[in-house]
Image (spheres, rainbow, N blue to C red):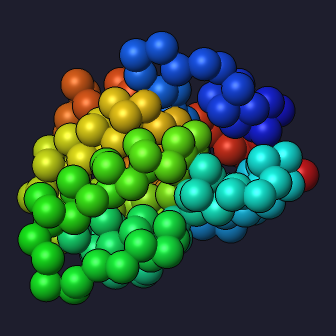
Amino acid sequence: MMMAEVDKILLTPSVVRAQCLLLVGDAGMGKTAIVDFASRHYAALLGDGARKRLVHVILPPVTVDRAMFYQRVLKSLGIPFCKTDKPDFLHEQVVDALGDLGTLMLLIDEFHNFLGGGAKKHLKEHMEAIRDLANIPVSIVAAGTQLAECEPCHPVSVRRLTGSDVDWLLP
C-alpha cells in the first residue's frame, strides 16, 4: 500500500512541482525499510545511472544543518565539495546537479534530524530548502519520527509533503 504511494509519486509526471511524501512514525515502525526498499526497487528499474536519478540520503543522528544536508546529497551524487563552503553555495550546487542529472526522486531517511532539535530555530529556512528542491522538480520522499511533522510550525512549506501514518505496518 505504501509502495503504491511511492510509485504514484515517482511515476506521475511533474508539470510544475514534483509530488512529495512524508512518512512519519515511531522508531521501529518500518520507515527505513520502505525507503531502502524503494531505493533498491527503483534503482533496479532505472538501471544504469540510477544512483544519480534516484538519490538516497541518510541523515546522521545529530542535528543536521543545511550545509550538512547539502553535503550529504552531493556525496550521494559523487560530486566533490568543500566542507567550508557556505550553505547558499552548496544549495546552488545541489539544485544544479539534481536538475542537470535529471534526478527523479530524493529519498531522505531520518528527516527529523533536519527539522528537529537545534534545527527548530532554522525550521523556516530548512523547509524552504526542501521546497526549492521540489521546485526543480524532484520528488521527495522523507521519513522520520514525529519531529518531522512540522505542519503547525510552517504550514505553507509543509503542504508539499503529504503526511502518512505507517501504523499499518504493525502485525
Quarter-of-image position of residue 56:
bottom right
Horizontal side, residue 37 vs residue 67: left or right:
right
Q: Is residue 52 above or below residue 5?
A: below
Residue lying at the far right in this picture: please name it.
Answer: 171
Q: For the point 39% across and 28% down, which residue is it?
A: 160
Give how far across and how far down residue 15 sits, in percent.
Answer: 48, 14
Please state, as top left, top right, bottom left or bottom right, where the N terminus lies in the image.
top right
Horizontal side, residue 76 vs residue 4: left or right:
left
Give how far across and how far down residue 33 sits, in percent.
Answer: 75, 62
Q: Is residue 37 above or below residue 20?
A: below
Q: Is residue 84 above or below residue 67?
A: below
Residue lying at the far top in this picture: please name it.
Answer: 15
Counting labels gives: 0
Quarter-of-image position of residue 168:
top right
The answer to whether residue 5 of the structure is visible from this angle is no
Q: For the point 32% across and 49% down, which residue is it?
A: 96
Give how far across and how far down residue 128 sits, in percent.
Answer: 21, 41
Quarter-of-image position of residue 87:
bottom left
Give how far across and how far down residue 14 sits, in percent.
Answer: 52, 20
Q: Nearer the viewer, residue 37 or 169?
A: 37
Q: Nearer the viewer, residue 44 or 146?
A: 44
Q: For the point 60% across and 19% down, which residue is it?
A: 13
Q: For the point 41% across and 22% down, which residue is it?
A: 17
Q: Nearer the viewer, residue 22 or 150?
A: 22
The answer to whether residue 16 of the structure is visible from this angle is yes
Residue lying at the far bottom in this picture: please name it.
Answer: 83
